[in-house]
Amino acid sequence: MTDQHAGHDHTPPADQDGPLTYYQTMEIALRELLVEKGVVTADQIRAAVEAMDARTPAAGGRVVAKAWCDLDFKQRLIADGTAACEELGIDMGPTRLVVVENTDDIHNVIVCTLCSCYPRMLLGPPPDWYKSRAYRSRVVREPRAVLREFGTELPDHFDVRVHDSTADMRYLVLPRRPDGTSNLSEEALADLVGRDCLVGVTLPRLP
């Protein structure tokens, strides 16, 4: 497993009905202060949150389909995921994106063991299971068991690699292209790539 959590200052999400965490309290106080000082408006904050919530895995699917169809782009994506995404008009901001490729004997899975760091620009908001303590702890200890619960059975010879995201670095799985898709367009291929494939808990399949 890749352990890259040095300097990570995130905390696990609190239960919705529980008391606010220290960081949640600080976020509310800072937001209210910025509005009070006129730095931003409440409408601007609301619009930014709505824009983040509107993100979907479609952008990630587009990146993968491009890599499947364009070998040169695939090489650039693996070398520098952030720069390659920007070629497609996807702004990754300061985030470093590391793309890990599934092969005939390597399968990659993504987790954030301390909280829920996740490439939202490509996948949208993380699902509840990704943020859960059960997934964050078990996928490190028993990744094959967790994959089976998602319906993903891998041959014994596969090397299952678990990658731990950080506050400033995100991972994206580049799945293997399914057999029987040579006649599909790039747009049709993108439709085969769901969020869970890009996290690594499932495999892309023909409908």
Image: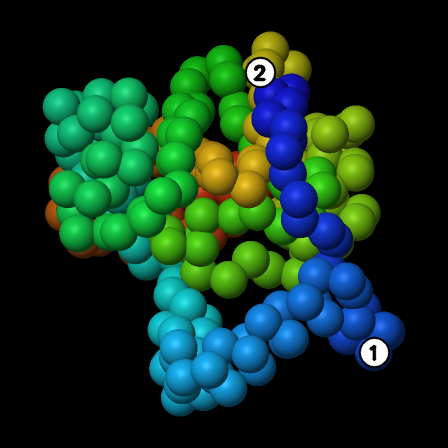
Query: Image height check: is 197 above or below 125?
Result: above
Q: Which residue is mark 2?
A: 158
Q: Which residue is more in the foreground, 173 or 85?
A: 85
Colour logic: rainbow
Mark 1 or mark 2: name the one nearer the start of the chain.
Answer: 1
Estimate the spatial distance between the alpha carbons at disc 1 and disc 2, rounded to whole Å: 41 Å
Q: Nearer the viewer, residue 26 or 110?
A: 26
Can you name the residue that lies furthest to the right here? 18
Name the side, left or right, on which 82 lies relative to 147.
left
User: As drawn, is 81 to the left or to the right of 148?
Assistant: left
Residue 182 at x, y percent in the picture? 18, 35
User: Looking at the rendered structure, which numbered label has been put on residue 17?
Assistant: 1
Q: Is residue 154 above or below residue 24?
A: above
Q: Position of residue 74 (x, y in %)?
A: 22, 27
Task: Find residue 104 and report its image quarter.
Answer: top left
- Asked which quadrant contains residue 102, the reply is top left
Q: Is residue 85 above or below residue 24?
A: above
Assign the C terminus to one quadrant of the image.
Answer: bottom left
Mark 1 neighbour class, 10 Å CA radius: few under 14, some 14 to 19, many 20 or more: few
Q: Is the residue under label 2 in contact with that under label 1 (CB below 8 Å)? A: no
For residue 190, side relative to residue 149 (left or right): left
Residue at 40% x, 24% y: name it.
Answer: 101
In-front residue for pair 165/35: 35
As drawn, the residue found furthest toward the front would be 37
Query: In the rendered image, is residue 38 in sight?
Result: yes
Locate the N terminus by quadrant. top right
